[in-house]
Structures are given as C-alpha cells and as structure tokens.
Image (tube, grey):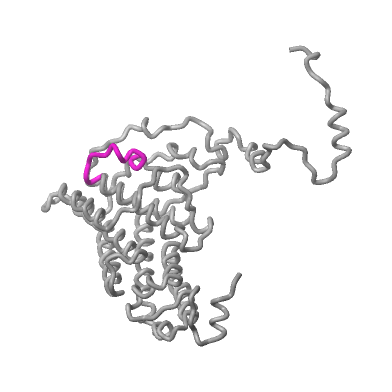
Amino acid sequence: MCDDDYLDVSRFLEDAVERMEVGELIHGEDFSLQDSMAAIGLMNPKMDVGFGDRVRANDVDLKWDLSPEELVALADEFLRREAVWLEAHTLPQTIYASVYLLRMEECRSPLLNALLRMTATRVSLLKDIIAGGKTVTDEEDFLAGNFGLPLIPILSIEAIANIATTAYAELPERTSDPYVSALRDRIMWRALYHGSLICMVQCQQLDYPEEVIAKLQHTMEVLRKSKETMAKVPAPGFDERVTRHLILTSPPRSTSFLSTEEAYNYYERNLDQLIQMCTLSVKYGLEENVMSGCMMTYTLNMIALYNSRLRPTTLSRSILQRMIVDPFLVTKLIGNKVRIETLGSVRCQDPFVYSFLTLKG
C-alpha cells in the first residue's frame, strides 16, 4: 500500500478541535465510555479475564471414584468457598470453580452426588433468601449474579432427605475409618441445614417456634461434631481457570479463602444468630410490643438488639428482614398466638408510629 492510498485529515481534525468546547466528545453511536476504559486492560493478565489459554470443563481430568477422606476434603472446601461467596465474592471464583459441579450430570457415585446436589441446591436457596425480592441488599454485601452458570432449582426437604438416605446406604454402619463417620456427619449437616433454612423462610413443616429452634440446635450439634475430623489431603476438582471468563469485563477480584476451621466457626456463628433471632422476642419480652400492635417498637428493638449483640452475617440479616415484613413468618417464628401487622396494613393507636410506618418515600 502506497502513500497515495491515504487521505490527510489533519486539518479537518484541527478544525474540529477548535470548534469543540471543554467536555465535548465526538464518537459513534455504538461508543461506550466504559468499554473504552476497559480496553486499557486488554491483554493484561491481571485485568483481562479472557486473556490466556481457556480451560474447558470437559477437558479437565476428574477422578470420580473418591475415597471417604477425599470426599470429606471436598465437602469442607465447598464450605470454605460458600462462606466467602456469602461475603460478596463471585460464584465463578468460589463455589463454581469446582469442575465436579459443572459436570454434575456425569456423577454416578451416590456419595459424591449427595455433596454436589446439596451444595448446588443450597446456592439457589441462599440466592433466593438474600436476593429473592423480599430483602434489600447491595453488591458490597452479596453478588447475586448467576454469571451464566447452570444453577439447579431449590430442592424440597423430602428430596434432600432422599438424597441423604441414598448416600447413607453406601456407607458401612461399622468401620474403623474415621473419615466414613466424618462424611456421614457432613451429609447429615447439609440435609439439616437445608431443611432448617426452608423451615425459616418458607414456613414448611413449622407450627411453633420451638420446632425451628430445635432444628437449628440439632444442626449446630452435627456441625460441631463434623469438624472433629479433618481431611489431610487437598480437595480434588477445583480449577478457577474454567470459569474465569464468566466474570465478564470486571477484573478478577483477589479472593482470600477462610481456613477450614474459620469456615466452621463462620457457620457456627450463622446458626447461633438464627437461633437468637427466633428467641429474641421471648428473651427480651418483645412479644408484648407485637401483641399490642406496635410493630414499630418491635421492629426497632429487634434491629437494635440483633445488630448490636450478634453482628449479623448477610444471610441472617436477610432472614431478619423477612421476619419484619412478612406477618405470617413472624407469627410462626415468635409464636402462633401473636397478632402482627405488616408495614402496608397498620392498625396502631400511636399516631407517630402510624405516620412513620405509612410514610411514602
């Protein structure tokens, strides 16, 4: 190509610059300021999520016949990654960096299938609780995006029980292998935890607050028993490169995972907060506020006590929000004889409380 093939537009550009005011920009219809800024990071491995060789899930060599110790390690790794995901990290960088989850339909082992199904359905359940439309959250608290991942529906309590029962049948009743017992505890804990959450947010199989408290306390006992035996081998089947491209144009965030002990402590604190949530009204005499119809007094006391004493996690804070705005749920969790009013249907004698509750933003 010779110089005659080019047209000198220097003068044209100089004239355009002279006519433009400060802050003006000439661009095409498809121009995006965000895309133009993101272009700076192209080919930079720290910024460009599509840079480098992409590893496909089907190309990863997986071991499907896992030993009890490897299954225990996998269960605990899911727990570590789930705790970090609940604190505002992305699914592709945490839980769904597991190639087993991405290729779950290939699993033929009842034990591995139980861990995978329970983990995947709990992701869907937690997303529904925290960002399902009945709560208020932001990206600093929780990233609710699916990122194109193949999430599964929320399984019922009965479906989870069937999965756990099928897995138990694969384990010997009597064994000297400590990892067999540890695996059984981990499967049981996941089934109990899933059921407890559904009881709290969907009011299934729940008639009195004592029932859900008992479920949560039993779940806590099994969780504490589970951490008595830890695996000494690394968890198999995780590769962050497989899902790295799903983070779109955002640069990969630095993810610091909790230790296994820290993850168990995180869930102990979470369960303790849920138990305290169900007992706050009885412990501090708040049921009188509710029975008198003074929803505002109850709400303010609940929030003040809960936040100051318990430092709530994202999950427990979301369930607290549901308790405040859902009259049926509050009635179930703090007593079936309590008369409760919703924020949209208030019958309160206190004019200040009534005006506050009915104030339109």
Position of residue 211 relative to residue 181, above or below, is below
Residue 102 lies in the magenta-colored region:
yes
Span highlighted in magenta in the image: 99-112
Which SS type dominates the magenta stretch?
A: helix
| Closest to the observer, 278 or 52 | 278
Q: Quadrant of the C terminus?
A: bottom right
Callout count: 0
> Residue lying furthest left in this view?
174
Q: What residue is at 33 percent from the left and 81 percent from the top?
A: 337
Q: What residue is at 36 percent from the left and 40 percent from the top?
A: 102
Asked whether, in this view, residue 220 is left or right of residue 37, the answer is left
Q: What residue is at 34 percent from the left and 71 percent from the top?
A: 275
> Residue lying furthest top in this view?
2
Where is residue 164 shown, x and y percent of the image? 22, 53
Where is residue 316 shown, x and y percent of the image? 41, 65
Residue 109 lies in the magenta-colored region:
yes
| Closest to the observer, 328 or 86 | 328
Where is residue 91 shown, x and y percent of the image? 44, 48
Residue 55 position by quadrant: top left
Q: Quadrant of the N terminus?
A: top right
Q: Is residue 226 among what the camera can see?
A: yes
Q: Is residue 77 among what the camera can see?
A: no
Position of residue 242 relative to residue 331, above or below, is above
| Closest to the observer, 168 or 33 | 33
Residue 321 position by quadrant: bottom left
Q: What residue is at 52 percent from the left and 44 percent from the top?
A: 252
Where is residue 139 shown, x and y percent of the image? 53, 55
